Image: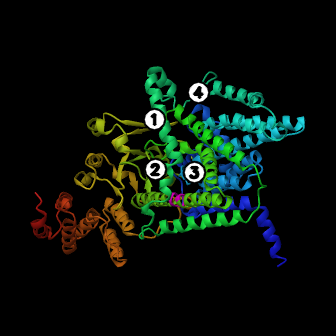
Amino acid sequence: MNKIRPLFHFLRRHTSPLVLLAVTLLAYAWQITSLGFFWDDWVFVGRFQNMGILNTIFYGDTRQLGVYALMPGFLLAGDSPLLWHLYSLLLRWAVTLLFCWALNKLWPGQKTAVTLMAALFAVHPAFSQQSISVVYSLQFVDYAIFLLSIGLTINSERAAAPGRHWLWLGLALLAQALHLFVVEYFVGLELIRPLVIYFLQGQGSRDSLSKSRRLRRAFVCWLPYLLVMILYAVWRSGALGGGFATYDYKTITALLRSDPRAAVLETLEYGMKDILVLLVSTWHATLTPAILDLTQPFNLFSLAVAVFAAAGIYFALTRQDFDPAGGEARFLRQAALLGLFAVLVSFIPAWFVRRHIVEPGNFGDRFALPGLFGASILLVALAQFFAGQRKRGILLSAIFIGLAVGAQMRFENNYRWDWERQLRTYWQVYWRAPALQPGTVLVGYDAISMTTVNYVGGFALDNFYHPPQTPASPAVWYVNYPKTTIPANLEAFLAGTWHYTDTFDNIIVKIGRANSLALDYTEGRCLKILTADDQVNYNLPEDFRAAAGFSNPALALPQAARLPAQYIFGAEPRPTWCTYYQKAELARQSGDWPGIIALKKEADKAGLQPMNAYELFPFIEAYAMRTDWANAQKLSLQALKSLSKTQDGLCLIWQRVGDAPPAGYAAAFQQVNQQLLCH
């Protein structure tokens, strides 16, 4: 018993940080070893590998200081996905602790409510992109600096000794300047600082002050922070160089100059929608009928964890006597006012560049990040108010937190599937093309995965093939065919009189038919590197079949210089049907017909079946070239029966075999052609 007592004492003393750690782990730790890089993670990592830690940021002249916010992550994690996700998890917990620390300083007698606010802040479902670990480390480091600056401001206002006041004030101003100049996401939240200072004027010995005197005192105390804001605004406006380089083509000020009425209406309409999404609509994802799907066990598991998290929070906080009696009404008024005001001003940077979380897109909810501060405070304050009694208020808040934990688990699981989708594509490309000629451009159709869009695919595939510590120019690049101007200039492109140039930041890639290798990675079938035969592959989008006319399979080389980096892409997966199919297509390229037949026998022995009728083609051609007419006919008719639109492709194979007909070809072709009906 004596040994257990210190443990209970430790748990009671550190209930708040342990609850926040548990909530963070329950929400984000389940899939941490099964996640990779997503979206611009690939860009930052690629630039880190090739250009060094000081060149990881690639956008916006005024965002280059963000390198220093990314630096801790790169120093600790390098280019390891696992280490990045561990760092991201710890960073999220650290930011949550700073949130809790700052609010406990503002409301020192409300530790229970503040802990609930911090727990909700850690998992609020309005932001679903925690798994994009590299990119958002920039924002969360900046969030940490902002929260630190708020806490230091409170310290300076509460300091009894003048010397301590000026010390805390200087540190608060330094932290304010740091978070403003690193990235602009939390500029709007700066407007809560005078409100926080105003709250502090009414505490302690200043309770007798009139409201007007408290306002004047708060304004005077806020003046140093206002000066920093003005200096930032001048710098960011471009008066001293720079400006809003990232989105300078789409600011609300530009629209105001051209159409003031449209600017006002747009801001009001989309602004109200953003606020509604942040405060209300986002909770729909936490409890929908789709979760109760017996074919999706992880969804049911996330619901069970949500119940467990809510019960655990309720149990942990109702058994603690954190807070002295009294002051609840004043606290709830201040919390509701601060939370609502913080929500309103949090969107200012996004609205300035006309970005909204209600607009479609995979990454739009990043603009909700600043709003998590106010939304978490407001929801817990309302829960406490409407519950009316302490334990009921804790229970209601705990239910919201539990639901958010379950939602974050499902969001992370979606990223796990996205990583699986990426890996399937990369490894199939590798099996089909173990090496690529330097300068090869892979031409795809639409995004490789939900998060691997356009230029991101170029960095991901270059990383897969390209050893680190190489020059910045990519050995392998990728373009999304519909997003290029090739379709509009197809005739000149095919004739070689016109080339497409793809540019991204400092990368310039000239693309012609000689260095283009088209590939189809449609879900539900094996990846296909296109050849001239695929001009009659009717599984492809109609406008993409033209890419088969310029795809150059000779760019695929049979010998790999090295395996892809295992610490990024994992070990080579166990063979599937697609493994044998890709290797058969590679062997077909060099005319290794016995090798293809051996691969088919291995696949048959493993009980593997094609996912699509077109995947039988290399084996049909191999059997025909080796005069195994029975198997060639059998597989041809199997493909035709499975998918009648394979007819033209099958005819091309048989006609190619007939260009230099082996013994028995005429009789075999005549027999199979009774159903193929080749012209």
* Disc with the residue nearer the chain's start (2 vs 4): 4
Q: Secondary structure at mark 4?
A: loop
Q: Nearer the viewer, mark 2 or mark 4?
A: 4
- Residues under labels 1 and 2: Cα distance? 31 Å
Q: Circles 3 and 2: CB distance less than 8 Å?
A: no
Q: In the image, what residue type sits under mark 2?
A: Thr
Disc on the earlier residue, 4 or 3: 4
Residue 52 falls in which quadrant of the image? top right
Pick the quarter of the image with the N terminus.
bottom right
Q: Residue at x 43, y 50 (%)?
A: 437
Specify the quadrant that holds the C terminus: bottom left
- At label 1, which amino acid type do we have? Glu
Q: Disc 2 marks which residue? A: 452
Would you say the residues marked 4 and 3 are in contact, meaning their CB atoms lie under 8 Å apart?
Answer: no
Extent of the magenta region: 407-411
| Marks 4 and 3, how far apart at CA | 33 Å
**What residue lies at 50% left-to-right and 41% top-to-bottom?**
274
Frontmost of labels 1 and 3 is: 1
Q: Nearer the viewer, mark 1 or mark 2?
A: 1
**Is disc 3 placed on a helix, strand or loop?**
loop
Q: Which of label 3 and label 2 is nearer to you?
A: 2
In the image, residue 195 lies at what x, y percent?
70, 36
The image position of residue 179, as x and y in percent, is 68, 38
Front in this rendered view, residue 310 or 356: 310
Disc 3: CA contacts within 10 A as few (<14), some (14-19) or many (>=20):
some
Q: Residue at x 18, y 62 (%)?
A: 644
Relative to the observer, which residue lies in front, 649 or 538? Answer: 538
Q: Quick one: SS at disc 2?
A: loop
User: Whole-percent x and y of residue 429?
Assistant: 41, 57
Q: Is residue 116 visible?
A: yes
Q: Identify residue for label 3.
A: 468
